[in-house]
Image (cartoon, rainbow, N blue to C red):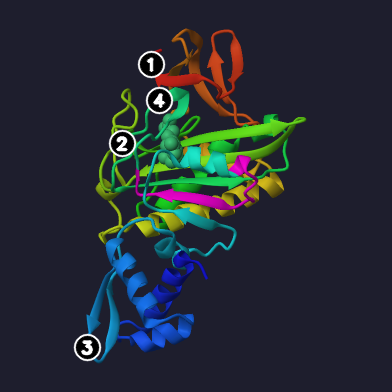
């Protein structure tokens, strides 16, 4: 048993016994290790933010768990059994970690969690500010699709985030094509960054990176005002980061399965349209150099996840790629 497995096993026993204490001897027997080894793992857990009381003659009692997206806190809350969680502390970028694992052959369903990122990345090479108080995660998928068929994936991930927000009791979030999740007042709540690699026209892996502002509005995108989950009206219960991570992963599993089995054109596309932020509004789509590609009114999204814009010359569809979308006056 590895150290992390021992810690998970200790937590499992303490959680089930809480509010009662468990003796060091019982824990040592359950894990088939020495009492000294148990003491060491308890020390590591305390460093991670677990409040574990030790009382002479009674043993250890779990009083408080950390409010951080640690695998040991998120896993017990998951309904889905497809995810294998790692990480949970500070890292550069969970997308970079996930990509490295994907290239090394990790299987579908590996997830990297982080409570802070020092080099969080957004679309178009932008920085994604990732202070403590947010949920940052990246999931490795191995879709049996061609790269062209991956087009709707950011929209599917966006749907998953809006479903998670609703499941947590925070009402209806909105979707701004292609990869933003907005609060109903038009500020940015979450962002999605999909990266993938293909061989012989088949996707070998895709990484879905999701960053959600939970306790503070991280200035994720200089051009967009940000909001955070706790500022939304809805449930009055304080939201805990492990619950946000688990709800997001459960919703992502469900939405991805729907996409893999039935495709985007149908129920998912309808759901996207029903939550779309700029439908009917006048927008300008610019490329990475700032040159206007299309200007007109948003008519919706097509079956491949492209944005459909009604221009003076007729309807045109824009793929996500390296473009930005801004509301403008018509
Ligand atoms: C965007 O809005 O441009 C996308 C932001 C994506 C941020 C998430 S946080 C988890 C994952 N790791 C990263 O470095 N980026 C994504």
116 versus 314 height, above or below = below
Q: Earlier in the sequence, mark 2 or mark 1?
A: 2
Q: Earlier in the sequence, mark 1 or mark 3?
A: 3
36 versus 124 height, above or below = below
The residue under the point 60% across, 31% down is 305
Disc 3 residue lies near ligand 1 with CB under 8 A: no
> Circle 1 is placed at which residue position?
328
> Circle 4 is placed at which residue position?
126
> Circle 3 is placed at which residue position?
56
Q: Position of residue 202 (x, y in %)?
A: 74, 35
Magenta segment: 102-116
Mark 2 neighbour density, 10 Å: few (under 14) some (14–19) many (20 or more): few
- Whether the magenta-drawn stretch holds residue 114 is answered as yes
Q: Position of residue 327 (x, y in %)?
A: 39, 20
The residue under the point 49% across, 37% down is 96
Q: CA distance from mark 1 to mark 3?
A: 68 Å
> Circle 2 is placed at which residue position?
185
Look at the image and tell me whether residue 280 can be seen: no
Foreground: disc 3 or disc 4: 3
Q: Earlier in the sequence, mark 2 or mark 3?
A: 3
Kind of element beneath mark 1: loop
The residue under the point 37% across, 82% down is 35
Q: Earlier in the sequence, mark 4 or mark 2?
A: 4
Q: CA distance from mark 2 to mark 1?
A: 17 Å
């Amino acid at each position: 048993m590895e150290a992390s497995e021992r810690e998970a096993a200790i937590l499992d026993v303490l959680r089930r016994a809480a509010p009662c204490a468990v003796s060091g001897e019982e824990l040592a027997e359950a894990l088939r290790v020495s009492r000294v080894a148990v003491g060491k793992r308890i020390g590591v857990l305390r460093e991670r933010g677990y409040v574990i009381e030790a009382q002479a003659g009674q043993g250890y009692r779990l009083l408080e768990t950390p409010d951080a997206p640690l695998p040991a806190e998120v896993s017990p809350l998951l309904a889905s059994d497809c995810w294998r969680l790692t990480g949970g502390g500070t890292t550069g970028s969970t997308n970079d970690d996930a990509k490295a694992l994907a290239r090394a052959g990790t299987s579908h369903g590996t997830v990297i969690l982080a409570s802070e990122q020092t080099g969080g990345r957004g679309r178009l090479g932008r920085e994604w500010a990732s202070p403590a108080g947010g949920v940052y995660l990246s999931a490795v998928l191995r879709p049996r699709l061609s790269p062209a068929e991956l087009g709707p994936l950011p929209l599917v991930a966006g749907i998953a985030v809006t479903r998670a927000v609703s499941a947590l009791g925070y009402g209806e979030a909105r979707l701004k094509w292609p990869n933003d999740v907005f609060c109903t007042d038009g500020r940015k709540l979450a962002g999605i960054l999909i990266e993938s690699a293909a061989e012989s026209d088949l996707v070998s892996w895709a990484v879905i990176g999701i960053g959600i502002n939970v306790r503070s509005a991280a200035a994720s995108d200089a051009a967009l005002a940000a909001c955070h989950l706790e500022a939304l009206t809805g449930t009055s219960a304080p939201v805990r980061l492990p619950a946000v991570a688990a709800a997001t992963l459960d919703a992502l599993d469900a939405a991805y399965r729907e996409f893999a089995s039935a495709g985007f054109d149908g129920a998912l596309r309808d759901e996207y349209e029903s939550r779309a932020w700029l439908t009917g509004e006048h927008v300008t789509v610019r490329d990475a150099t700032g040159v206007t590609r299309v200007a007109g009114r948003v008519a919706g999204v097509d079956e491949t996840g492209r944005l459909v814009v009604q221009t003076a010359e007729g309807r045109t569809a824009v793929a996500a790629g390296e473009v930005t979308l801004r509301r403008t006056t018509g």
